[in-house]
Amino acid sequence: MVEVHQKYPTLAELMEELKRITDIGFPIAAMSLVGYLKNMILVVCMGRLGSLELAGGALAIGFTNISGYSVLSGLATGMESLCGQAFGSKNLLVASLTLRRTIMMLLFASVPIGLIWINLEPIMLSINQDSGITKVASLYCRFAIPDLIANSLLQPLRIYLRSKGMTWPLMWSAFFSTVFHLPITIVLTFYLRLGVPGIAISTFITSFNTLFFLLCYMFYNRSTTSTDSDESVLMPLSPPPSSTALMGREWGVLLRLSIPSCISVCLEWWWYEFMTILTGNLSEPSVGLATSAIVIQTTSLMYTLPTALSASASTRVGNELGAGRPTRAKLAAMVAIGLALVTSFFGLIGTILGRQAWGRVFTKDNQVLELTMTVLPIIGLCELANCPQTTSCGILRGSARPGIGATINFYSFYMVGAPLAVVLGFVWGLGFVGLCYGLLAAQIACVVSILTVVFKTDWEKESLKANDLVAKSDPFAHADPTLLTKC
């Protein structure tokens, strides 16, 4: 089928694409908000246990994010390109095999991560961290190790369903598991007096509950929709006979997409930890660290919309490229960027108008509140760049170009942002405000670079690359669904 090209999309096409993106993105945004509430529950419960437990728990959460969850999340996003384009080209087998291989890859990666978590205490003591705080953090990490297994299964499954455009089950599974999360955490932490281990146990129980709800939905959907062969992951589907060289090529393609995706995600996650370390070396570290905690909570909340738009853009671009419709893929990318620009203005307005009220939610300290009110508008400007930048990263993943995003993130955050933050914060004496200006510079460099790449994209070429990546990768591509089910 030859795509009919036209110079400009019609209003009807724009509205249709807008509806598709919002249909995918709204449940993801709601799921992210639910996840934010889950993390808030953890912090509140740690605070109820005591200041030592709160400090140790904060250290543990930061360490697990850096060394574990960011790595698993980044590796899993590598399958977005393959699954999105595979579903677009109706290559159901490639999507299913990609899911299974990604799960195997994450489980394998969880082994060294688990070993690091077990040995957290000697690692932290070797860099002169407080022994009491380190002991609490080490206890949390050891009991949280099963969560690595849960995330190794849950992250790929979410991306698999999202690549099909099925995002409502993701939202409802996260919602119901979070509803149970609060009573489970209270019972384990306070009634059974498990303390910090109880909080860690409740975390992985909630993850397994989310996984359970998702699998229940998939089995139910399969049983009630007899023609839905897309759920091939639930079938005992054996891959077609292939040579060792072909299997190696398929694994090589997945790794070439997953590793740059992982680097891109980790570089951005790690920046905030780098910023926290720098804040601890300021002249008034207690005020700076308290403000930094508020800033991180603020950016985590504001990040829900860019995350949803990024996932929507990746799915839509991947589906359209896989289906051989480059013009529709370009339209999806442009609509997603337009939405990102609009929503980023709401973030800027919110941080300016609501900075005092939002700061008082977290603190009554006048110094911390004053510094928070100073930096929140800067964070709002960061969001003005972050939202289109994050959305554009999704476009690059959908077109199987995560390596470009990783390169841009590296030089923007660590070649531009980090040196400028050090100079402004320490040399020019701006303190924490200078660090925030460094973050703003990094976001501006990132968004300018990545938007340049997106707007210069040759969509016809990307469509041909998608055809080579998924449509010809196995003999069952575009096969009749009934035949595929029988296989």
Image: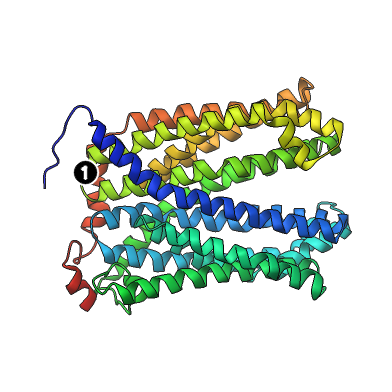
Q: Who's the residue at 82% across and 62% down the image? A: 136
Query: From the viewer's perspective, is 281 left or right of 297?
Result: right
Residue 48 is situated, as x and y percent measured from the top left of the image, at: 83, 59
Q: Who's the residue at 63% across and 68% down the image? A: 180
Q: Is residue 419 visible?
A: no
Q: Who's the residue at 80% across and 40% down the image? A: 290
Between 459 and 287, the one lying in front of the other is: 287
Q: Is residue 474 visible?
A: yes
Q: Who's the residue at 54% across and 58% down the image? A: 72
- Give the answer, above or below, for where 127 lies relative to 341: below
> 10 Å neighbourhood of mark 1: few (<14), some, or many (≥20)?
many
Under circle 1, the secondary element is: loop
User: Which amino acid lies under the numbered mark 1 shown in the image of this protein?
Assistant: Arg
- Residue 237 found in image quarter: bottom left
- Give the answer, above or below, for where 230 lies relative to 371: below
Residue 428 is situated, as x and y percent measured from the top left of the image, at: 76, 19
Residue 316 is situated, as x and y percent measured from the top left of the image, at: 33, 46
- Residue corresponding to mark 1: 325
Quadrant (top left, top right, bottom left, bottom right) of the C terminus? bottom left
